[in-house]
Image (cartoon, helix red, strand yellow):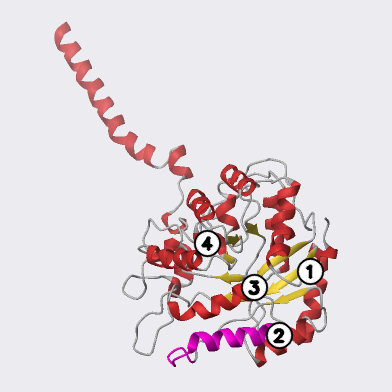
Amino acid sequence: MKSWRAISVSAATLACIASVALLWPRAASTQPSAAQSQQTPSSQVPNIEEYNPKSTLVVPEHKIQRAKFPFIDIHSHHWNPTAEHVDQLVKEMDSINLQVLVNLSGGTGEELKKTVATMKGRYPTRFVVFANPSYNDIDTPGYGQRAADRLAADVRNGAQGLKIFKNFGMDLKYANGERVHADDPIFDPLFEKCAELKLPVLIHIAEPSAFFDPWDKDNERWEELKEFPQRARPPSKYPPFETLMTERNHLFAKHPKVNFIAAHLAFHGNDLQRLGKLFDALPNMYVDIAAVLAELGRQPYSAHDFLVKYQDRVLMGKDIYEVNEYKWYFRALETRDEYFEYYRRRHAFWRIYGFEVPDEVLKKIYYKNALKLVPGIDAKAFPN
């Protein structure tokens, strides 16, 4: 009898436990776990273009609004400026200590004369205008000498340098469809004229190497290519990046008496060791930092050391003119600030750091190197 009662009690207990077990999952499912309650609904998950986290980092900040020394912007574009535009430019330049602005978009012939009159005619010491070559007659024999003669006329009309745009080497073609190479001998008379007149040549060859790479998840310029798909340089339409670099370097080497300023850190801002080797091999090569501040800002130690070592070869430049964006250049060059946002996300989804350089290096980047290369700039406005 005792055994039977024990068995009966055990059965009743098991039944009770089973009923509780059946009810427990239902009760538990009505109360989300802490982890579940913190999950973001899938409909609210940001995509790569929307994700823009706000930094919680607390560090000293130095938001510089005005350059420490007067500076020369070697890389700016102002097509067919009006008198009103020029007046506004000078007011804005004064506010940030921009003493001389170089307009690389002067054109040639009558267009150049008009731009020089509008800018230098009103403010003789505040602007420099570079001429641009015309390719309209490139298929007609004798092109090189005509291009040289046009440049000489442009210099007589006020041009102080030559700017070559990025279609050179990439898009420029002869009438038969053949690509015009960047080191094509047809241009030799033009560069010889630059050497004769001691004119600097600011030249844009190629694009960032990432534009030539597959446009996929591994491409760090994915966002810019999404915004401007026409900037992609697929091999079906364009020569490889390295082909353009080889042609450019050959051009610089065969004209050693011409001072070439390679725009945008020569598109080697992501490989400063490579750029340093080029400087060592090509004493007539210089670069500007226009539109590539993000490349330097993500490698502050390397950038600092590079700029100190090659302080005589680097010039200040901005490219797209916007007076409120210069302050990022001042902050990067003049401070050791950490992990701050760059002003143009499509150039860099990363944050940047200050790589503060010594004052003597800063003066060379800001104005001394430009004074050395560009004829006719009034040096009295700058510290010795």
Q: CA distance from mark 3 to mark 2?
A: 12 Å
- In the rendered structure, which disc, 1 or 3, sits on the residue that comes first in sequence? 1
Q: Amino acid at mark 2?
A: Arg
Q: CA distance from mark 4 to mark 1?
A: 26 Å
Numbered badge on residue 266:
4
Residue in the image at 67% along x and 51% along y: 332
User: Is 240 placed left or right of 99 in the picture?
Assistant: left
Task: Say if the magenta span includes residue 294.
Answer: no
In the rendered image, residue 228, in percent from the top left (x then y), is placed at 47, 72
Q: Tell me whether the residue at label 1 lies in contact with that at label 3, contact meaning CB atoms closer than 8 angstroms.
A: no
Magenta-highlighted residues = 137-156
Q: Amino acid at mark 3?
A: Leu
Numbered badge on residue 156:
2
Q: Main secondary structure of the magenta part?
A: helix
Q: CA distance from mark 4 to mark 3?
A: 19 Å
Question: Mark 3 highlights which residue?
Answer: 199
Above or below 205: residue 84? below
